[in-house]
Image (cartoon, helix red, strand yellow):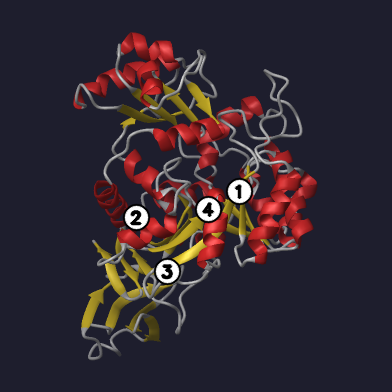
């Protein structure tokens, strides 16, 4: 059934009522209400809702997000001891021989430090793995360290040690993981999502090819190439943007890390952190970064460079300038003022996660004191002509672009006043950044659409965060109906 009529919808922000005809996966016509009632094989009544481009989450870790939804939540922990208490409240839900997994803690403001001995005292002999919210820290018990054949003085692993240990931990069988991922994408579709960019540190092309054999995903998926798989991707002939088969998969960019994260105090900065002499962690020296970027670009793979600290962003921008290729900087959380206009000048995408700003405001005020006027500087980037794309970095934040849209517009998610409100951006720009750059709906567009129950232009940031969705369409086919 290729023909669909969206009846009684408002087209675009503050738009008037219309009927929208969809045929063969594209918007075929936008007509006066009632004029197309005899046309379609299927009619969907929008009840006066607003039709907008579908949302694209520009930065997701699909398996980690799907798994995170089943882990013991630790985001409310105010200390290491508190995290252990939260864990103990839920540990009875696990079997005595199971790996106990918690996630979401933020230790940047904790008065105490996580340590393997805390876990051993609370759960003697149990294998326990606790993931920080930013995925850059893994806190393991002695039994969990033994499980992966490691020893460590504190059990708190950072950055590359964290990621390699994560890969070594036991995981659910592939068929179970695939089912969890499918469920997570269906939940995303219920929030208007029609596409994701999967930054999972794995062979995403092989994983998504397996998952979509025989069944279509609920969203489009761009499969990011991780650093260890660069030569594999080149040998396979993958090029960024190319379709994978005839389905909803495509090749994503090539991911590299320059630094770590703010909460782990490994974001690489020009100035040291106030409680140490360390400016953070440089993951990839500039010469090596440029070499890898050039190798990727010469073979049709667009670099996506993780840079959070201001010095990391300077290094990333310098590398793009030296290589002369397009690309993306992922996160761009702290910027030197002179680097802001370089994004537009180099034609780069600033791939940002606005939902992180309310979560990180207190940590930023402490560890980036005196510099937060140039942190999460979305308005400055926008005004300089840069292209913004909004992602969640799920599971660091929920896979729900409305959370990021609300944070970009309102700069807060609680009772406190907006944090650096001068860096808030207009709703229309936030929606475009969360929709892969699409602004509005026009005849000929791919029918990746959503119908919101209310016009977003009339809502407060808090109301945007809880936006009710009437329907989501992927290539004209409903993936969610309220």
Q: Dot 3 corresponds to which residue?
A: 52
Task: Describe the element under mark 2 as helix, strand or loop.
Answer: helix
Residue at 21% in and 85% down: 41
Q: Nearer the viewer, mark 3 or mark 4?
A: 4
Q: Locate residue 21: give its quadrant.
A: bottom left
Assign a secondary structure to mark 3.
strand
Compared with residue 17, is residue 225 higher up or lower down, i.e. above or below?
above
Image height of 65 relative to 79, above or below: below
Which one is earlier in the sequence, the residue at label 2 or at label 1? 2
Q: Are marks 1 and 4 in contact (CB under 8 Å)?
A: no
Q: Earlier in the sequence, mark 1 or mark 4?
A: 4
Q: Which numbered tag is attached to residue 229?
A: 4
Q: CA distance from mark 3 to mark 1?
A: 33 Å
Q: Which residue, given by chain and number where applicable, does mark 1 sit on? A: 256
Instruction: Report if residue 121 is visible in the image.
Output: yes
> Dots 4 and 2: beta carbons under 8 Å?
no
Figure disc tally = 4
What residue does disc 2 label?
Answer: 188
Which disc is residue 449 wearing? none
Looking at the image, tell me whether mark 4 or mark 2 is earlier in sequence order.
2
Left or right: 260, with 59 as reference point: right
């Amino acid at each position: 059934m290729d023909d669909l009529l969206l009846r009684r919808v408002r087209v675009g922000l503050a738009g008037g009522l219309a009927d929208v005809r969809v045929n063969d996966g594209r918007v075929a016509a936008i007509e006066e209400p009632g004029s197309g009632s005899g046309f379609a094989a299927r009619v969907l009544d929008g009840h006066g809702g607003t039709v907008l481009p579908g949302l694209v989450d520009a930065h997701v870790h699909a398996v980690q997000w799907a798994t995170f939804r089943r882990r013991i939540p630790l985001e409310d922990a105010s200390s290491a001891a508190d995290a252990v208490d939260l864990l103990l409240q839920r540990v009875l839900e696990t079997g005595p021989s199971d790996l106990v997994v918690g996630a979401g803690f933020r230790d940047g403001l904790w008065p105490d430090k996580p340590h393997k001995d805390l876990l051993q005292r609370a759960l003697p002999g149990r294998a326990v793995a606790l993931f920080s919210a930013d995925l850059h820290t893994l806190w393991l018990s002695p039994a969990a360290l033994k499980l992966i054949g490691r020893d460590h003085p504190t059990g708190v692993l950072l950055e590359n040690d964290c990621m390699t240990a994560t890969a070594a931990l036991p995981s659910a069988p592939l068929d179970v993981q695939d089912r969890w991922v499918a469920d997570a994408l269906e939940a995303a579709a219920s929030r208007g999502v029609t596409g994701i960019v999967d930054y999972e540190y794995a062979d995403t092309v092989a994983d998504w090819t397996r998952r979509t054999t025989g069944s279509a995903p609920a969203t489009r998926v761009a499969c990011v190439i991780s650093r260890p798989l660069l030569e594999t991707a080149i040998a396979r002939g993958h090029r960024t943007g190319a379709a994978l088969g005839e389905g909803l998969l495509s090749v994503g960019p090539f991911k590299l890390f320059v630094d770590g994260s703010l909460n782990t105090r490994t974001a690489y900065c020009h100035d040291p952190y106030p409680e140490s002499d360390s400016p953070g962690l440089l993951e990839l020296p500039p010469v090596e970064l440029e070499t890898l970027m050039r190798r990727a670009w010469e073979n049709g793979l667009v670099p996506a460079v993780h840079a959070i600290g201001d010095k990391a962003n300077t290094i990333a921008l310098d590398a793009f300038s030296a290589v002369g290729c397009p690309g993306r900087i992922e996160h761009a959380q702290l910027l030197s003022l002179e680097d802001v206009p370089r994004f537009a000048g180099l034609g780069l995408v600033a791939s940002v996660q606005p939902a992180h700003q309310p979560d990180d405001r207190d940590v930023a005020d402490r560890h980036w004191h005196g510099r937060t006027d140039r942190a999460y500087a979305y308005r400055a980037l926008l005004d300089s002509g840069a292209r913004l794309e909004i992602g969640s970095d799920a599971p660091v934040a929920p896979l729900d672009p409305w959370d990021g849209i609300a944070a970009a517009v309102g700069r807060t998610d609680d009772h406190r006043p907006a944090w650096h409100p001068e860096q808030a951006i207009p709703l229309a720009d936030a929606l475009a950044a969360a929709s892969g750059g699409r602004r509005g709906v026009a005849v000929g567009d791919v029918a990746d659409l959503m119908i919101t129950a209310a016009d977003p232009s009339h809502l407060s940031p808090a109301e945007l965060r809880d936006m009710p969705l009437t329907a989501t369409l992927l290539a004209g086919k409903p993936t969610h109906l309220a």
